[in-house]
Image (cartoon, rainbow, N blue to C red):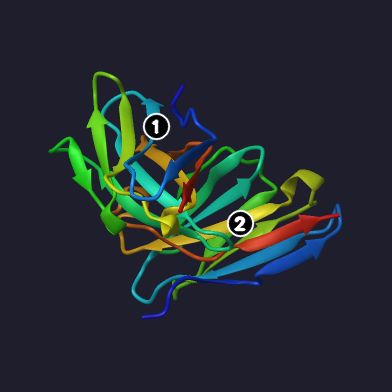
Amino acid sequence: AQSVAQPEDQVNVAEGNPLTVKCTYSVSGNPYLFWYVQYPNRGLQFLLKYITGDNLVKGSYGFEAEFNKSQTSFHLKKPSALVSDSALYFCAVYNTDKLIFGTGTRLQVFP
Amino acid sequence: KAGVTQTPRYLIKTRGQQVTLSCSPISGHRSVSWYQQTPGQGLQFLFEYFSETQRNKGNFPGRFSGRQFSNSRSEMNVSTLELGDSALYLCASSTTGGLADNEQFFGPGTRLTVL
């Protein structure tokens, strides 16, 4: 069965430190992978996607994600976290006409 | 350019009633997708419409239905409401590529509470 896992409910990081939000997937074939962010009382915002090509994808707000086919992972990263990055982050995979979201990871960046 | 708008923003209904939610996509966008977000189940895909036709469908019961009009505006209907239907319903639009498009633009959502 197709699935997306975000193993951490919450990630805490100090401002200025690098951050990683983890995502692993299980799908057949070659997936399209996405990251979205949701700020309080707002809808989701697209951050980045991976279709094919370079394993390191750069997206909005300084975020990037690394696709690792052998580990079936698509971790979200940022070299230096900001307090304003605090939000709920969702990983998603599109495969065979379905978009499947992870359960979300709450990122808390402390000043 | 105006973003995706959803009406109403908040809704309270009782069990057994039906409800209709509305979504107006970004001008020029022809694909509209609907999602349900709950604390327990997370974000789940409901369906996608393109050019007035349902193009993709998630695993929801037939009580959940939708339609799209010629101006790309979309409505979602839930009949015979259950307590478990309480959720934030999100709508997203994109140009033509649908789910795998470069970017889906999400509306702020409609918060439905079923009592």
Tell me which corner region of the image, top left, top right, bottom left or bottom right, holds residue A40.
bottom right
- Identify the disc placed on residue A50: none
Looking at numbered disc 2 in the image, what kind of residue is underneath it?
Tyr
Tell me which corner region of the image, top left, top right, bottom left or bottom right, holds residue B77.
bottom right
Q: Is residue A78 visible?
A: yes
| Chain to which mark 1 belongs | A
User: Residue at the location (37% across, 66% down)?
Assistant: B30
The CA distance from mark 1 to mark 2 is 24 Å
Residue A65, image x and y in percent? 27, 40
| Chain to which mark 2 belongs | B
- Answer yes or no: do the residues labelled 1 and 2 have beta carbons within 8 Å? no
Query: For mark 1, what is the residue?
Result: A23
User: Residue at the location (48% across, 27% down)?
Assistant: A7
Q: Is residue A29 above or below residue A89?
A: above
Query: For mark 2, what is the residue?
Result: B89
Residue A67, image x and y in percent? 24, 32
Looking at numbered disc 1 in the image, what kind of residue is underneath it?
Cys
Instruction: Identify the element where label 2 is drawn.
Output: strand
Residue lying furthest top: A70
